[in-house]
Image (spheres, rainbow, N blue to C red):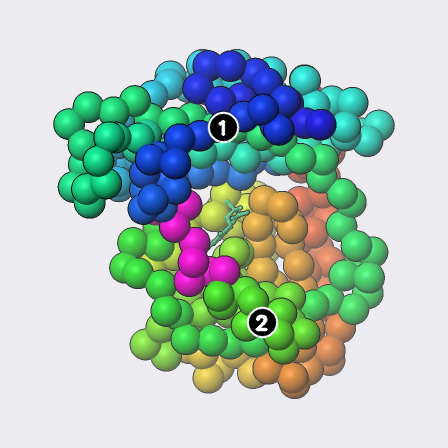
Amino acid sequence: MPTVYLNGTYLPAEEACVSVMDRGFLFGDGVYEVIPAYGGRLFRLDHHLQRLQDSLDGIRLDNPLSDDAWRGILDEVLERNRDRAGADNDQSVYLQVTRGSAARRDHAFPEQTTPTVFVFSNPITAPDPLIATRGISAITLDDIRWQYCNIKAITLLPNVLLRQQAADHNAAEALLVRHGRVIEGSASNVFVVREGVILTPPRSEQMLPGITRDLVLELAEQHALPYGETDIQADSLRQADEIWVTSSTREIVPVTRLDGAEVGDGRPGPAWKTVIGLYRDYKEAVRNGTQDQGL
Ligand code: PDD
């Protein structure tokens, strides 16, 4: 049984209980982060904590903990669940902060509540080797979400419905289209490669500023790979040489079928091979402690 952290206590997951009056439960009134840790070392923690702060600001909730306190809790949860992870000790940590519980159900913020803080970790399983040879299928769907998708809110019902719609079509991801432009995936950011140039939509309130996305751009810059941040018209997706989706848990995944048609030659492309190589080198350097993460 995994050990979780809940409001100041480490305890077995089955014993962790949250009030039915918690605003996370009643309203989805909270935010979250998912942070990978390789060999026990948290990946880009400072970026995740900054995004957490931005999400909390976005929902007008004070951060209940300092960065140091967050780091201490995340490290402790990883350590306590080490025996559940494989020999490489790769885990992903989930943290959630809700506005806490109040005596009455009222949409407006309660006067005084203590936020609920919850953290757990899961072993990360190595990416399916078939992804490197075959890639995944995706479908395009209308983006039915709200206007503040830059906030990593726990209110994920639209994302859940969209991802399930993809699954119903035997696709691993839904690419979301708003006003004719592809924005991101249901739980990932999106890249396309056109004539050797790596392209992704610019940051906006319509999408989550992905930590993996930003690292891909950073690696492209460092290694002088041509890249750009630009709007991507949904009807130009079919002409893309490559499409990728990125996230902390899935890294960089080539999309080789879109809406039932092949992307490029239907196999993971050369730009993906280059970038996933750079990403894995970076990840190994984090694991070995040789990558300066500015912590
Ligand atoms: N989701 N866009 C959305 C809507 C997401 O939910 C995610 C990640 C991303 C990628 O962000 P990052 O690279 O920081 O993981 C983009 C996480 C993994 C989840 O909900 O489980």
Residue behind mark 1: 17
Q: Is residue 177 magenta?
A: no
> Residue 216, position in %: x, y?
56, 49
Residue placed at 43% from the left, 58% from the top? Answer: 157
Q: Amino acid at mark 2?
A: Ala
Q: Quadrant of residue 63?
A: top left
> Residue 290, position in %: x, y?
68, 23
Point out the stretch of residues depicted in magenta.
151-160
Please determine whether, in this image, residue 125 is positioned above or below residue 192. Answer: above
Badge 2 element: helix
Who comes first in sequence, dot 2 or dot 1?
A: 1
Q: Is residue 194 left or right of residue 202?
A: right
Residue behind mark 2: 166
Q: Main secondary structure of the magenta part?
A: loop
Residue placed at 19% from the left, 42% from the top? Answer: 106
Q: Is residue 53 left or right of residue 191?
A: left
